[in-house]
Amino acid sequence: MNVLQWVVDGIALGAVYALVAVGLALVFGVMRLINFAHGELITAGAYTLALTAAWPRAASVTACVLVAVALALATERVAFRRLRGATVSTALVTTFAVSFALQAVWLMAFGPEGRTADVLTTLNRAAVRGDVDLRWVTIVELVVGGALVAGVALLLNRTSIGLQMRAAAADPRAARLLGVRANRVIAFAFLLAGFLAAVVAILLTVQTPLVTPTFGLQITILALVGVVVGGIDRLPSATAGGFAVGFATAVLGNALPADERVFLPSFTFLLVIVVLLVRPAGLFAPLRASAVDRV
Amino acid sequence: MPEPALTVEGLEVRYGPVTVLRGVSFEVRRGEVVGLVGPNGAGKTTTLLAIMGDVPPSAGDVRLAGRSLRGRGPDAIVRAGVGLVPEGRHVFADLTVAENLRLGLVGRRETDGVADDLEWVHGLFPVVHEFRARKAGELSGGQQQQLAIARALVARPEVLLLDEPSLGLAPTLVDTVFDALQEIRSRGVTILLVEQRAHRAAAFADRTHVLFNGELKLTLTPAQADDTERLRAAYFGS
């Protein structure tokens, strides 16, 4: 048992989950929408990598980002913009519908057996060997995850559009009465979510190059659980929640015997249930927040 | 006589089966202060929200300097030159005072003169400058009201709508708010003032309309501000 190895793997996977959590929390913040279809942005990005695997790497990565961002903006414009003012359950059901519809599209277009996206698989090579094995992808996950979370935080705290997003998240009506353009702020949140989904797709395909129609689904569900556990209405707590679930998943994956890894999600959810029983307001939520406020 | 800055014509608003405004018409000329008073539920806040495009009217029109605002959303109306200080202030509690003020700049049309306007509102409301690094939620009610007015002013509105700016304030703070309104008026800002303190509003404004059950019942001049009998009659709908 190498605890340090577990911790390193946990931090790296936690960083990827944190990126998914940030994407979910950004959209939730400005629209009060739990975007279950976020996973399809990741899948779309991953399929783009698979389909452009023969292109130069930079072009393939650029195409991945463009497709995920375009799909994010398209879902907002076509499906979610009409949901403003709708009940939470209507909005949630619509995001399920968009997600399942897109999964059906992937299935029809690319088949159930999957496509291989081996664009950046060279990152699987070892960077450091010793007591702790460190692959390049682990370093990239740590650096990119940390930099992007910090970048989003800076953008929210230091720019005018970030300030408008925070205001719209706190009180959308009051923000609009000050001249904040709801369409622009919401579209920007989706744009960022699409970009982050593309980055997640790139990082995930390094370790799991086989892209199937449900490629982005499981990480989104788990990150969503993390976001709710952490506290969805605040970006730092949502990010920390996503990170925690990613970390726990990696550590449990290492700790469980190989033949029991199939039960990994069950163990993760068990951990989530325990956390919510002990701290129903969320692991990282301020003490005053209630569970009802968050969900 | 100055030209009309804001014209409200035959405004009718319904919330489901309930008619809240019934053909309200009035005009605020450039540089004027017009008061709007009336009992709770008379439709004062609804009038302001309908002007801002936050509540869709079922009939009637709102014009800014002669141009209809029909069909525009609140963000477009702010950019057209109407600012609102909402009831209950609605400052963003988790943002700093300075950030709240910066949000006011979002609705501004001109990019020049920002520094001058900020200096002016800092002079008008020194607490806004003094507590700029604090969270707005940590301010007292009076300080939050000053921040809400300052935030609306930095957008440099042609018409400023104020919804009960003295609500819940101690008497000395009410004086502070009305002193600031006098200063804002002297800068030539056109003001539509909704107030619970009817006498105070009537004495301050060039003209004050009394709204009852969604209809304008009476118009008072400052000289009639102490005419309690007429005011009381209008408040009870007679």
Image: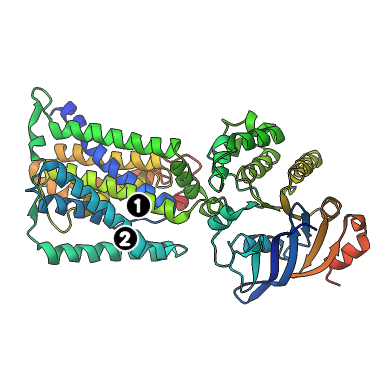
Q: Residues within 10 Å of mark 1 (few under 14, many from 20)?
A: many
In contact (CB < 8 Å): disc 1 and disc 2: yes
Mark 1–mark 2 distance (CA, rounded to whole Å): 9 Å
Q: Earlier in the sequence, mark 1 or mark 2?
A: 2
Query: What secondary structure is found at the residue carrying circle 1?
Result: helix
Coordinates of residue B176 in the picture (x, y in percent): 77, 39
Coordinates of residue A159 in the picture (x, y in percent): 44, 38
Q: Is residue A13 visible?
A: yes
Task: Give the side of residue A135 with respect to residue A40, left or right.
Answer: left
Report which quarter residue A122 is drawn in. top left
Task: Give the side of residue A269 with respect to residue A255, left or right.
Answer: right
Q: Nearer the viewer, residue B80 or B221?
A: B80
**Hey, what amino acid is under mark 1?**
Phe
Task: Give the side of residue A250 with respect to residue A245, left or right.
Answer: left
Q: Is residue B136 above or below residue A113?
A: above
Q: Determine which of the numbered discs, if any, sits on residue A190 in the image.
A: 1
Coordinates of residue A124 in the picture (x, y in percent): 9, 36
Query: What secondary structure is found at the residue carrying circle 2?
Result: helix
On-image quarter of the N terminus of chain A: top left
Q: Is residue B57 above or below residue B142?
A: below
Q: Determine which of the numbered discs, if any, sits on residue A75 in the image.
A: 2
Q: Residue at x 63, y 34 (%)?
A: B116
